[in-house]
Image (cartoon, rainbow, N blue to C red):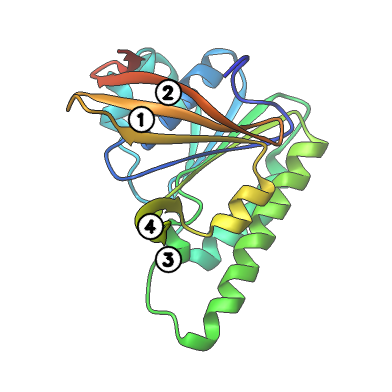
Amino acid sequence: MGGGLPIHRISFLYGEAATGKTVLSMQCALEAAGREYKVFYLDSDQGFSPHRMERLTGGRELAEKIVLFRPEDFSEQGRIVENIENLLTRTRTLLVVDSITGLYRAGRVKSGEFFGRDRELNRQIAQLHALASRFALWVLLTGQVHSSPSGGEWAVEPVATRTLLHWSDLILRLSQASRSSVRDCFLEKKDGREISGMHCPFKITEKGVEDA
């Protein structure tokens, strides 16, 4: 990626289930904690496992430094995003939201409520973008995907594509590689510019994400 996640920006990581989004997010959180940064982790998908994190490299020593939030619904996620500013200081901070669209999709939504939910998602991400620009803050969002028809085929796209593509300066897509034990990470956007052809295969082990 030519330097890692950019500070003062939003980075977005998306992919299908079991492609490594949560493991990579936890590994980034541990890396930041090991550098004495503040780390806030919003587990909106209820996929965060303390036992899994402890098995990752540095997990036993660093996991207790990570502040975990577990919103119950999309409204509570919004309230946490609103109030996160009260926890930010001059200390460098990593904020992970895994995933930003999990609770956005959850529950029954009446046909007339979709616009309001889209507007709320945009408001939350805009708030995170504003905080990143004002503080020494990295924001890492993960996102779920859905299939949509494109050119006679079905393409995998992130949920709320337009909103997330608009606000994200760095975008990474994870996918299953041809070998069952290997995943692939594609760089799709960097510094606000679309990029194609750059990718890196990796594997997920007990210790975390490693080169394949």
Name the residue beneath numbered marker 1. Answer: 23
Looking at the picture, tell me which residue is in the foreground, 128 or 11: 11
Query: Comparing marks 4 and 3, which lies closer to the viewer?
Result: 4
- How packed is label 1: few (under 14 Cα within 10 Å), some, or many (20 or more)? many
Q: Is residue 19 left or right of residue 14?
A: left
- Image location of residue 202, percent across then percent down: 33, 19
Q: Is residue 22 left or right of residue 123?
A: left
Q: Quadrant of residue 146?
A: bottom left
Residue 70, relative to residue 88: is it above or below? below
What amino acid type should be assigned to the residue bearing mark 4?
His
Q: Which residue is located at x 60 percent, y 61 percent?
A: 78
Q: Which residue is located at x 44 percent, y 31 percent?
A: 25
For the residues labelled 1 and 3, the Cα–Cα distance comes to 22 Å
Q: In the rendered structure, are the residues bearing label 1 and label 4 in contact, judged by CB atoms less than 8 Å apart? A: no
Looking at the picture, tell me which residue is in the foreground, 169 or 121: 169
Residue 27 is marked as 2
Name the residue beneath numbered marker 4. Answer: 146
Q: In the rendered structure, are the residues bearing label 4 and label 2 in contact, judged by CB atoms less than 8 Å apart? A: no
What amino acid type should be assigned to the residue bearing mark 1?
Val
Name the residue beneath numbered marker 3. Answer: 105
Query: Comparing marks 4 and 2, which lies closer to the viewer?
Result: 4
Mark 3 or mark 2: name the one nearer the start of the chain.
Answer: 2
Give the residue at the far right of this rendering.
134
What amino acid type should be assigned to the residue bearing mark 3?
Arg
Q: Quadrant of the C terminus?
A: top left
- How packed is label 4: few (under 14 Cα within 10 Å), some, or many (20 or more)? some
What amino acid type should be assigned to the residue bearing mark 2?
Gln
Query: Comparing marks 3 and 2, which lies closer to the viewer?
Result: 3
- How packed is label 2: few (under 14 Cα within 10 Å), some, or many (20 or more)? many
- Image location of residue 11, percent across then percent down: 60, 36
